[in-house]
Amino acid sequence: MTIAEPAPLTDSEDRSDPTASEPGPRSATVWTAWKPHLAMALMSLAAAVYVCQGLWRAPYRHVVADNVSDQGQFEWMLSYGVHVLQHGGNPFFTDLLNAPRGVNLAMNTSSTIYALAFAPLTHFAGPQVTFATILTLNLAGSAVVWYLFLRRWLVRSGPAAAVGGLLFGFCPGLVSHANGHLNWTSGWMVGIVAWWVLKLPEKGHRLRNGLVLGLLCTVGFSVAAEALFFTALACGLFLIVWTLSKPGLAVAKESAGRVLASLGVTSVVAGALLSWPLYMHFDGPLKFSGTGFKLRYFSEDLVAYVAFPLHSVAGLFGWGADLAPNPTEATSFLGAPLVLLFFGALGVLWKRSSPERRVTLRALTVVAFVFFLLSLGPRLQVMGEEHSDIPLPYALLADIPLFDSALPVRYTLVVVLVFAIVLALLADEFVAGELTARLTVGALIVAVLAPIAPLPLRTLERAPEPEFIAGGGWQEFVTPDGVMTSLPLSIDVAVDGMRWQAYTMARGGDAMFRIPAGYFLGPQDYEETGRHLVGRIGAPDRPTDKLFYNAARWGQVPKITNLDRAQARVDFGYWELQAIFLPAEVTGPKGPLNRDALLRLTTGLLGEPQQVQDVLVWRITPGVDPVDRPEKN
């Protein structure tokens, strides 16, 4: 027995087949073995393109409607990979954002591996195409990797493995995260790491297994550090429960030396490769503690597990429930039918399984239950109402490092993965049985999965890149590496300024400008106290920044006085700002922002702008502009 028993031979390799002893040409044998895998890959890719079709229809204009800002942030991160490769910059810190302070990218979802690996595509096609490409491959890859994982370790049947792979790869949680998150859609990474964890007991491969796992952990940290943390927790918990069984203990005694030796190699390799980003994360410049998001807000609602997702087949009929913190974090929403089938499947499998397989079922059940409790967060929430008088286990973990940075709602994805594994085991149990049993189980699986089948991601149009940026006209207004901003200053609800900088980075070349503010996680202040406080979204507010924000978001244009201009001189001087420009369109979180209010506000502050190509420009002399004006009594 192993940690997860390898599946027997495939149907095409059945030893009962009289032709099995007379294999054909090697090429034919290889093709026969890989044909179902290729079919699964094509089916998964087609499903991923279907989900992401809105982006592919117009990648340079369309953006995911439910998370405009995160897509813009990831496009910036992808473009920064081109900049790093061209100029040899620090991949974990930049001064291009949040001038003059900079941003600790190791504290953010910098996705360095994606940024560097896809840099050629970003350079030649733009970060918009790279974003859509990675998102599509993430969804397809998650389904395929877990199909292969199940096929290798747990099930005999390819179709059964496909059920599990497709359920996880296109579950409501991953499709929800496809609204802007390249990190949380990378379920393939979790599958490969888990695969190699199960290989650790192998004989004769201590060095190889430890080395590969160390490299995988390094990649996983870059792609999705929070997901890697969950993977380590889930694998550790699974192995502890599995080892505490009688058969598991015997195997653990026999393989403990090999496993520990491989883990030692893993620690050395991953520790060496991650020493720089880990230092930047835990003790680097502009670090902070915890996260900029509230754990109690980003916790799973108890009822969400049995509800249907809004953006699904069930949602088309009005059966969806709005119980998620936001559309990107709708991670459970499995529906009552699937939850009932899951528990029924556990009972059936338990009765029909061998003692060894029951060990695996027990470990999976414990993992699902623990992660279910963690997903509920520090306080119980039911139907959108928090019961503050009912503390949950996460309340004890909320101040512990790593746990304080993880959003509870995301632990749900591990629960969903266990659901996918159990459904694959159920399908595998009956796939070779009587026709009636096969049809019954197949119909049940289709019936419970159909309501949560995803719809394509919603998209909307965003502002096109100004010719002023694309054509390089901006260089007439800013010194090399000088500071310039689009209006409003970049923040989570307005990332156009970061996009213009990102597209400039992606094209390459030596000309570059810096921008103040930005959409990122950073400290609450730049003193020593900021290193020990929870983070915040964006830079600490400055009065002039808030003026621009209120005009863009709410249309507020107060009467500008010389006191406002004096404050603007201070803020412009702090940012070292040399130019401000206003494009013809300004994108917000749900559509255009209030450009007219921005124009009136900035004109009142700085005077009439200069029309340059397709934007309005105000030149700034730091410490001088805006100049005071005579005021009426």
Image (cartoon, helix red, strand yellow):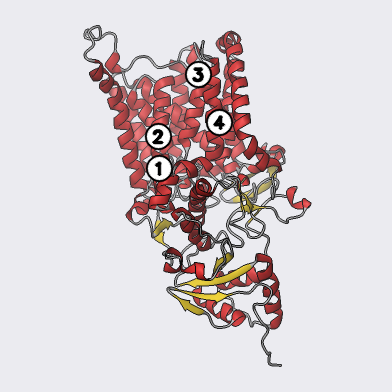
What is the spatial separation of the Cα atoms under label 3 and label 1, in whole angstroms? Answer: 34 Å
Hey, which quadrant is residue 485 in on the image?
bottom right
Please report whichever mark, 3 or 1, sits nearer to the chain's N-terminal start.
Answer: 3
Q: Which residue lies under the disc numbered 1?
A: 452
Instruction: Decide: few, some or many residues near mark 4? Use Cα within 10 Å; few <14, some 14-19, many ≥20.
Output: many
| Type of the residue with mark 1 | Ile
Please report whichever mark, 2 or 3, sits nearer to the chain's N-terminal start.
Answer: 2
| Type of the residue with mark 2 | Ala
What is the spatial separation of the Cα atoms under label 2 and label 3, in whole angstroms? Answer: 21 Å
Q: At numbered mark 1, what does the secondary structure look like: helix, strand or loop?
A: helix
Contact (Cβ within 8 Å) of mark 3 with mark 4: no
Q: Position of residue 302 (x, y in %)?
A: 56, 42
Q: Which residue lies under the disc numbered 4?
A: 217
What is the spatial separation of the Cα atoms under label 2 and label 4, in whole angstroms? Answer: 20 Å
Q: Which label sits on residue 199? A: 3
| Type of the residue with mark 3 | Lys
